[in-house]
Amino acid sequence: MIALQNVCKSFQDGDVKHAVIKDLSLSFPQQSSISITGASGSGKSTLLHLLAALDTPDSGSIIVDDLKITELSTKQADEYRKHYLGFVFQRFNLIDCLSVWDNLCFSARLTKRFDEDYIDSLVQRLGIEDLKHKLPQTLSGGEQQRVAIARALAHKPKLILADEPTGNLDDKNSENVVQLLFELCETLQTTLILVTHSQPIASSAKLHYCLRDGQLHPQSRDTG
Amino acid sequence: MKLDAIWQTLTVIFKGYKLYPFRVFLVALALVCACAGLTSVYVLNETAKTSYANQSQPLLNGVGRAIIAKNGEQISVEDYAALRRAGANNLVAVAQNRLEHSSDQIIEVLGLDLYAMMSLTSLLSEPDTQQISQLSFNNSSRYFIHPDHLATLTREGVVKNNELIIDKDGSFPFSFSLTPYAGTGMGNQLIGDIETVFDDFPLSTISYLLVIGEMRIKEDALPEHLFVRELNTGINAEELTESFHLNLLAMGLLMFVVCVFVMMNALHLMMMKRIINFKILRQLGISRLTIIYACLIELIGIALIASFFGTLLGLELSSLLSPAVNQTLQGLYGVYVGHSNISLLQLFVNALAACLIGGLVAIILPLRLLNQRMAIAVTDSPSVPSNYLWLGGSLVCLGLTGLLLWLSDGLVSAFIMLACLLFAGCFSLLYLLPILINWVSNITPVQYPLLKWSNSDALRISRKSSIAFCAFFLAVAANIGMNLMVNSFRVATESWITQRLNAEAYIYTNQTDDVISWLHANYPQIDINVRQAEQGKFHQQSLQIRSYPQDSADQLAMQFDKASQQVWQLFAQGKGILISQQLAFANNLSLGQSIQIERHSGHKVNYIIAGIYLDYGNTQPQVLLPEDAFEKSRQGRKILSLNKVPGSSASISALVSDFPTTFEQTQIIITEDLLKLSMQTFDKTFVITNGLNFITLFVAGFSLATSILVIDIDNRPQRALLRSMGVSSLALFKLSLVQLTLLSMFIMVIAAPFGFFLSWLLINVVNLQAFYWIYPLIVDPLKLSIVFVMSLAVLLATTAIPAAINAKRRPIEDLLCLND
């Protein structure tokens, strides 16, 4: 269970204080896929950062699997991210000096959860077997994002946070990549929280919310 | 080309400064450091040279002789009066005194008989007459001082309101009223009337009598205790200090070259940051040439500002260093450093010229890259030079070094050869560094993903900051080269002195017979050996001729560079002589060759060269002859070597304590003390160059550290990614240090052989060309370790603080750049 209790977050812009999340209380079920849409600057990425313990709310608390992440020390927050989370970014953010295979194994080795067969199965599932020995900059955008998804899942995290994972991809690639992400998270029973501008992609998630006026509003999967 | 287009481009450039202030600062800092280094070396050299020139130049032109007293004697006022009465009324009495105004600063106070001088103006040149008139007519003021010297002393706070206040004998403070006067030959001196000097220094006596014009009295008619001496003695000091200045200049130039590399690196980083804006300008219709012109105008602006601050910093640095330089020169050569005649404008113009030359050299590569990048599509990546290109460059430069080594016949070609070697080193670094990093990356166990990332990332850093790596490499190689050369010279000198000084004590005296009589009477169990000395000529060059004993201990003590098999037989028979390495190298002499030497008596004698011996530190050529070849009755300064007769109970230390002080100008020195003194003098000679060496290393280390940090700023997404994966900031900080250590270790490993080769060339080519002596290269692991540890410490120290600040940044700040 991921629970947000009275979470507030605001940013100072000169003399003006902008509240992006206002007294938000909500629970997400585990092993589910959740999509969040909203206008630019509505606070979608901020919410992801709060869930990743990269940022702290002004008030309120966030609990992930009985772990109150808003009260973690810096070191505990590092450990939480290392073991519990997988990230997928808009710009892929693969480590450019490491090969695809080394990128995939990086988190797994870091967390001592390296399982070659499992990573191989991910590679096959994502269709990137031929890319294992290549360097990230030689891959296309779609290929890089598939590698990024594999890397996010390689250390078997309980929660995947995806921040606009299709923002740099064309429509065809977007559809393929997101379908793979949803399928894999479901197969591996990993919770996925995905921030996107795309209504069709958001509709593919089991739960769809829209962040507006600092609050998450449930959306129907059909209407978005 | 429209001026407004250049102006628009410049506006974009200047407004961009706030986006990358650090890179602009680095360019300016490199230029300021380069200027400051050159300016301080120039000021120190010029100040010292002015001081030698003043010390060697007589106060009056055409006055080259003086009457002085023999050892232990004095020129009395009565002697002076008697000589004038006897017809020598062209003599002027001079009283010399010294004032110590701090622990290491000495001012010479010269008292002249100005009234006598005034009566002799008809014998003087026009400028000298004017000078004497000025000094005499303004005599109400007590002492005259050169304005530049006055400015120096005022700046040092020794003089206030033209008053020099000194506690000259520890009893009460004494005030000297000073009047500035720019007289020729006025160096580090205060000049006043002799009466004033006698009043102020009651113990003062007449030091010598200047002979204005021709001698009006025969030398034979002089009283027994007086004799005539030539005054011009300063040239030797200039020659002696040549090695000191050559070292200083070499280090100054090296510092400049390293700074040019530092600047090149900073300009490269700056251009990379600007490339996007320049591309936009190109899209808006501004030509590439306009952008390049704007960059050059900007460089000229930076050079103007940097040369101004560099000159000021250089002046400050030289005044900070001057006490150490003064101490060295005073201790080594007895030269009292005063002031220089360098104008601030001249210094600024020199610095600006150096800045512009350095800046233009430094901007060529970044501009070339900029030109390429502006000409190609945005998506194209810049062409990376092939690794084999660096290998080729290295081999070509090494080939040139070899060619110059073969052809080199002067200092200029020797310096070009050193430059070729250093460039070969830079190319080798660019070739080898990626190979080494790749190798380490490949052997890093996969179980350590962070270490593997760190090692792989090091390759990226090495590619992006290759120029900064070259600058650091140059500094490390030069440090190794200089350190090994100095250490080899030190070891060679120490071993040479230890072996050559085989007696237990030495006496330097002009009263040989008296000293020997005293020794025979009081210490009969001491064995005395007299070393004869005279000045001769070889090919019209001045030559030291010395005697050398032939007993077995002295034969063992002699260190030969080359010697014939029967060297001592030939020497004993008077058929063969020994010549110093300096004489051999300077005149291309070899064993078995016959040379003609003009003895002090004027006789020309032919000798066969039987041996060439080591004679470090002596800039004068020298030959050794057997004692029989000298006239025993000849007077002059001689050296007595003292040894206990084997089995005797005589004590050298007792002799030293009993030795009478009545022997004037006689010095007794225990060998151990002489050795200690020699090595102290040696260390003093290189203290400044060691300091400059360290500054160069620090500047290069700072440049490399900043370059890596700037690249790290560009690498924020990668680090942010690691933070998002739960890698702690401490782990990232540690990785930065590991990465730096690895890179600097590689640089040092590659720099070491080039440092050895550099050292070998400095010893066998530069030393040979400059001083005509060579010595074996000694690779001391301890010295090498010190350079390694120092280089690593400089790099880590300059990087640790900013890296720690970077690592402390909240992860969210880094994360925000991930989707930028």
Image (tube, coloured by chain):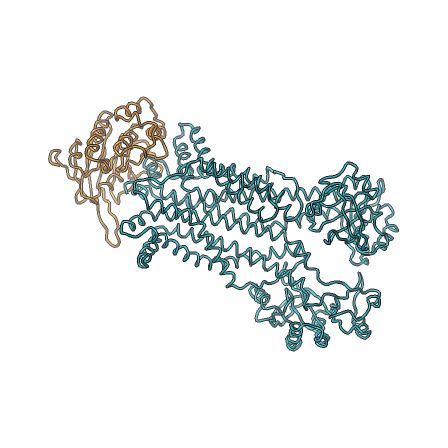
Chain colours: A orange, B cyan
> Where is residue A76, by image quadrant?
top left
- The answer to whether residue B669 of the structure is visible from this angle is yes
Quadrant holding the N terminus of chain B: bottom left
Task: Tell me residue B393's x, y (percent).
Answer: 48, 39
Q: Residue at x 62, y 57 (%)?
A: B326
Left or right: residue A74 compared with residue A46: right
Q: Residue at x 35, y 41 (%)?
A: B716
Give the tally of numbered discs.
0
Closer to the camera in the image, B534 or B414: B414
Closer to the camera in the image, B449 or B751: B751
Task: Tell me residue A20's x, y (percent).
Answer: 21, 45
Closer to the camera in the image, B787 or B175: B787
- The answer to whether residue B656 of the structure is visible from this angle is no
Residue placed furthest toward the right? B521
> Where is residue B375, by image quadrant?
top left
Residue placed furthest toward the top? A117
Closer to the camera in the image, B715 or B657: B715
Left or right: residue B147 compared with residue B20: right
> Where is residue B563, by image quadrant?
top right
In the rendered image of this protein, does residue B391 appear above or below residue B415?
above
Quadrant holding the C terminus of chain B: top left
Left or right: residue B380 compared with residue B154: left
In the rendered image of this protein, does residue B586 appear above or below residue B162?
above
Task: Tell me residue B84's x, y (percent).
Answer: 79, 74
